[in-house]
Amino acid sequence: MKGGVMERITYTSIPQAEFDRQTSLIGVAFKLIFRAFIFLPLLVTGYAFSRLSFVIHYSILARTAIVFAVAVGMYFLLMMVRGWIIRAREDGNIFWLPVFLLCCAYTCLLTPFLLHEPVLHLFTRWHWPGWLVFAVDTVIIMVTYFQYDFLGWRESE
């Protein structure tokens, strides 16, 4: 971007344009997979809610819509609670701590709990050491926490 106006990229060869388009699609796919792992607890909650819904005969499209609607609603609720946590912490209210721990348990600890068995199976199949499973779980916890950023550390910089 130069001077507030986006520069248009022109290609002299069609194969280079095709290559750039395909690699950008791979990047988008990796971003979607990453987001799916981050939002895994929300999607699982949406799936559980869709199983509990009172509609007996519904299509897979309706069930998918319920899953994503509940996941989006839970995300908005988490962001609202996150704002309350930040505000209560700044005001010196001590009740932000249990709410913070509950939110961290739901988002940060549920994801490695759900992914622990597949990762363990993968590592034992490849005969890798068992401590790597717990290292992967720790990395998942840290990445998930820093994506949600419940204490607002990135905003204060």
Image (spheres, grey):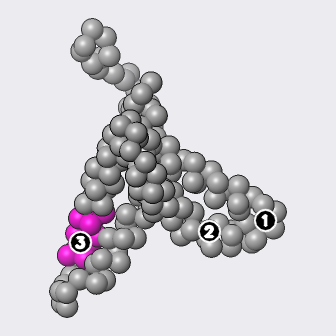
- Crowding at label 2, few (<14), some or many (≥20) Cα neighbours within 10 Å? some
Q: Residue at x 33, y 21 (%)?
A: 9
**Quarter occupied by residue 42:** bottom left
Q: Are marks 1 and 3 in contact (CB under 8 Å)?
A: no
Q: Is residue 122 shown left or right of residue 140?
A: right
Quadrant of the image for the C terminus?
top left
Q: In the rendered structure, find residue 114 and report the number of the disc placed on it.
A: none
* Inter-mark Cα distance, 2 to 3: 26 Å
- Crowding at label 3, few (<14), some or many (≥20) Cα neighbours within 10 Å? some
Kindly state the secondary structure of the residue where label 1 is placed.
loop
Q: Which residue is mark 3?
A: 66
Q: Which badge, 1 or 3, comes first in the chain's sequence?
A: 3
As rendered, which of 59 and 85 lies closer to the eye? Answer: 85
* Inter-mark Cα distance, 1 to 3: 38 Å
Q: Is residue 54 visible?
A: yes
Q: Residue at x 32, y 70 (%)?
A: 46
Whether the magenta-drawn stretch holds residue 31 is answered as no
* Inter-mark Cα distance, 1 to 2: 12 Å
Q: Which residue is mark 2?
A: 116
As rendered, which of 39 and 149 lies closer to the eye? Answer: 149
Magenta residue span: 61-71
